[in-house]
Amino acid sequence: MKRRKRRRRRLKPKTGYGKLGFASYADYLRSDLWRQKRAEFIASDWVKKDLMGKPLCDICGDWRLIEVHHLRYDHLGDEPFWDLRALCKVCHHHEHSLMA
């Protein structure tokens, strides 16, 4: 009877939020690190604003419930502004439904 050699399982390197020490993506979004990045992005010239300075949705132009959408997830923790997008809650949900 032959014995099979056991293969050692390679552990995948931590990526994204794992590298940053967060247990989940949701934990990262609740962190001070993300809150600061989000605030800097919304205050930047990368976000369209109305005459009063309120941020607007990139898609529909609404100003209510603006969320920041990641275009890609490989820059978590050090997101460049070109990798983010200001969207209202409805358009943000729609973007994610298109990704599925």
Image: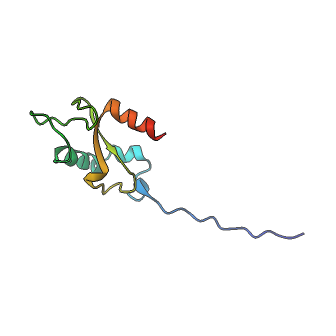
Q: Give the residue displayed 25% in from the left and 52% down from the top.
A: 81
Whole-percent x, y for residue 38 in the image: 25, 46
Pick out the residue farthest to the right: 1
Q: Give the residue displayed 42% in from the left and 38% down from the top.
A: 96
Whole-percent x, y for residue 94 in the image: 39, 33
Q: Seen in the image, is 72 located left or right of residue 86? A: right
Please state which of residues 92 and 30 is positioned toward the viewer in this rendering.
Answer: 92
Q: Give the residue displayed 23% in from the left and 29% down from the top.
A: 62
**Residue 10 figure quarter:** bottom right
**Residue 20 figure quarter:** bottom left
Classify 23 as above or below 67: below
Number of numbered markers: 0
Pick out the residue farthest to the front: 59
Whole-percent x, y for residue 31 in the image: 31, 47
**Residue 7 figure quarter:** bottom right
Whole-percent x, y for residue 30 in the image: 33, 43
Quarter holding the N terminus is: bottom right
Q: Seen in the image, is 9 located left or right of residue 57? A: right
